[in-house]
Amino acid sequence: MSINSQIQSNKTKTYVIMTFFVVFVVLAGYVLGQALGYGNSWMFIAVFFSVISSFVSYYWGDKLVLAMSRARPADRKRDFDFFTVAENLAIAAGLPKPKLYVIDDTAMNAFATGRDPEHAIVCATTGILSRLERRELEGVIAHELSHIKNFDTRLMAVVAILVGTVAFLADMFMRSLWWGGHRDRDNNRGLGQIMLIVGIVLAIITPILATLIQLAISRRREFLADASSAHLTRYPEGLARALEKLGQDKEVLEAATNATAHLYITNPFKGKQFAAWFSGLFDTHPPIAERIKMLRSM
Amino acid sequence: MNMTIWIVLGILVLVILYLWSLYNGLVGLKTAIEEAWSQIDVQLKRRADLIPNLIETVKGYAKHEKTVFTDVTKARTAMMSAKTPDKMAEADNMLTSALKSLFAVAEAYPALKANDGFIQLQKELSDTEDKVAYSRQYYNSTVMDYNVRIRVFPNTLIAKQMGFSEKEFFGATDEERKGVKVNFN
């Protein structure tokens, strides 16, 4: 598939997944609400809390992530390649130059964050800066800039709102069962019981399903960032080679935590995932081999 | 009777909205092209600014290599006085080949090659060439978006009347396609 049709296909798939997700959340809220007999007010409370928490992470998330990762601002003399590559690709993408930070760690990784291109930040480890050639680094930085250009932070914030809503609903449902706070509609006894059981099953499954959908979206956006990177540099082989090197690096990035893992270019917790046929569903990133194959087919 | 009026009004509103968004969209895309063009200018100027420093550094080690210095200086002057895109492209080629000869000459002076200032200047110049290339690439992508918007149906019927015509891509000139000869004499 050519670069442009890759980009289009990824965008379309994102829309499809997001639509399905919203419908799913609304249905879950409705069913849980009905099962308890409380109707639709549940949805609004859940969404409200979810939006608040998501806003906080959206507006202060980048400062938080930088502090957690112990990053220092990049210096043009010390980090000439990183600095100039970021400058050049920002020109090519028509974006303002993002703020650049460096993490002192020999593990190879990079991430981008920020709510829009004017407030964007790109961060790289000294490990990746020293081990990649300039053209490979260009591929990686172009990938990070593409996340910013495609407003992926904003998208994942919205997704996080949806997941949070579902988790909140399920949680409140289980709590209210425990404390016996639901009403029985006398004329719907039989139906009420069934709805209750359905409600419990859903309350357990929906948060897991919501997380799986969130991860599916994350993987799709990673493919899109790869395709956009190739579009920017006009040289997909650079990123492909960089990914090969990244795949061979077994070192775990100490500064990463579960909250920030999805922002990095490859999963920083290598080798720490459980081995099962479905474990691929719990990855924030697609498998490296698949990404390389896609890049080389352009 | 009432129904027909509403339908006609509705269609009229839709047409007006379409024309409005088409015009504004094209204005936005055209302005992006102008901005991208001035970006190329910025990078070319940056490159021209690096030249005097480069000449001084090389002169410090290779005083008698007069021809390369005059070539580079001539090309730079031509670059800075070029007003039209054609003249600019011509001067740009002159400068590129003059610089290549200058660096080829520098190869014969190991002390110069080891000089930190020279190495840094080489990096900066190479980086500026990248910047020029990327800003041209971005310019072409803005031209593409604009041209596509003009060419699709039904926009193509109206765009000309609105005063919007297609723009040209920034392509390689014939000189650039031929490749640059480096003279080692």
Image (cartoon, coloured by chain):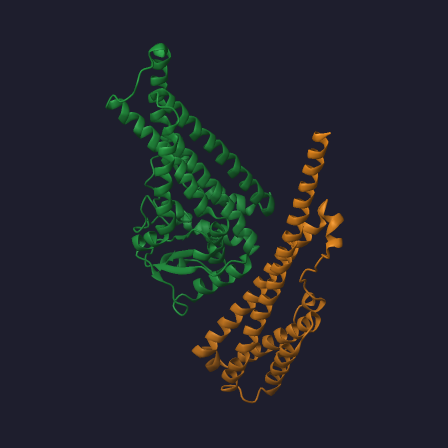
Chain colours: A green, B orange
The one of A167 and A109 positioned closer to us in this rendering: A167
For the image shown, how many numbered marks are present on the structure? 0
Q: Is residue A193 above or below residue A127?
A: above
Quarter of the view holding residue A288 = top left
User: Residue A99: x and y, percent?
Assistant: 41, 60
- Visible residue check, residue A34: yes
User: Residue A130: x and y, percent?
Assistant: 39, 60
Quarter of the view holding residue B37 = bottom right
User: Residue B42: x and y, percent?
Assistant: 56, 70
Q: Is residue A162 above or below residue B39?
A: above
Left-right relation of A144 to B55: left
- Visible residue check, residue B181: no
The one of B48 and B31 positioned closer to us in this rendering: B31
Quadrant holding the N terminus of chain A: top right
The one of A104 and A224 positioned closer to us in this rendering: A224
Q: Residue furthest bottom?
A: B64
Q: Residue furthest front?
A: B2
User: Residue A249: x and y, percent?
Assistant: 38, 50
Q: Is residue A93 above or below residue A290?
A: below
Question: Going 42% across and 30% down the picture, which residue do you hit?
Answer: A25
Quarter of the view holding residue A46 = top left
Question: Going 41% across and 50% down the picture, which residue do you hit?
Answer: A246
Left-right relation of A182 to B96: left
